[in-house]
Amino acid sequence: MIIYGISTCAATRKAQKALEAAGKEVTFRDVRSEPMSEAEWAELIAEFGERLVDRKSTEWRGLSDWLKHSETDAQLAAKPKLMLSPVIRDGDTYYLGWDETVEAALLAG
């Protein structure tokens, strides 16, 4: 299982702790310190579309108008911190965020 996120994100840390406490083998990847390739971003964008960008974040509010109106891949390549996190990959299945539904799906069985 891989968690993509930002090391300072509270939801990402909470997800990682819960998954590890449940005995899951978890690898964390900080998308700032280990940048994603174009192909990796494309895979996540294909899965989640524009939902992958956190438009409620301080980072979003600080973007230029040009970047706000750019394509999702350009926004995330320029500012990886814009990614709504965590993104969790469990085999071939992806989950966006950490809420009761995601937690139940990943901690069941």
Image (cartoon, helix red, strand yellow):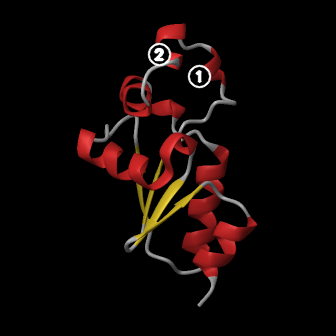
Determine which residue is flagged by label 1. Answer: 59
The answer to whether 32 appears left or right of 6 in the picture is: left
Determine whether 12 is above or below 1 in the image. above
Q: How crowded is mark 1: few (under 14 residues within 10 Å), some or many (20 or more)?
A: some
Report if residue 6 is visible in the image: no
Percent coordinates x, y for residue 2 in the rendering = 41, 62
**Extreme residue toward the right, this view:** 100
In the rendered structure, which amino acid carries the disc numbered 1?
A: Glu
Quarter-wise, where is residue 18 in the image?
A: bottom right
**Image quadrant for the C terminus?**
bottom right
Asked if labels 1 and 2 touch by Cβ distance under 8 angstroms, the answer is: no
Element type where label 1 sits in the image: helix
Element type where label 2 sits in the image: helix
Percent coordinates x, y for residue 83 in the rendering = 51, 38
Percent coordinates x, y for residue 12 in the rendering = 59, 51
The residue depicted at 74 percent of the width and 67 percent of the height is: 100
The residue depicted at 66 percent of the width and 46 percent of the height is: 10
Marks 2/1: CA–CA distance = 12 Å
Question: Which residue is more in the foreground, 88 or 68?
Answer: 68
The residue depicted at 56 percent of the width and 61 percent of the height is: 16
Question: Which residue is more in the foreground, 98 or 20?
Answer: 98
Question: Which residue is more in the foreground, 12 or 36?
Answer: 36
Determine whether 15 is above or below 77 in the image. below
Determine which residue is flagged by label 2. Answer: 67
Report if residue 23 is visible in the image: yes
Percent coordinates x, y for residue 88 in the rendering = 49, 61
Q: How crowded is mark 2: few (under 14 residues within 10 Å), some or many (20 or more)?
A: some
In the rendered structure, which amino acid carries the disc numbered 2?
A: Leu
Tell me which numbered mark, 2 or 1, is placed earlier along the sequence: 1
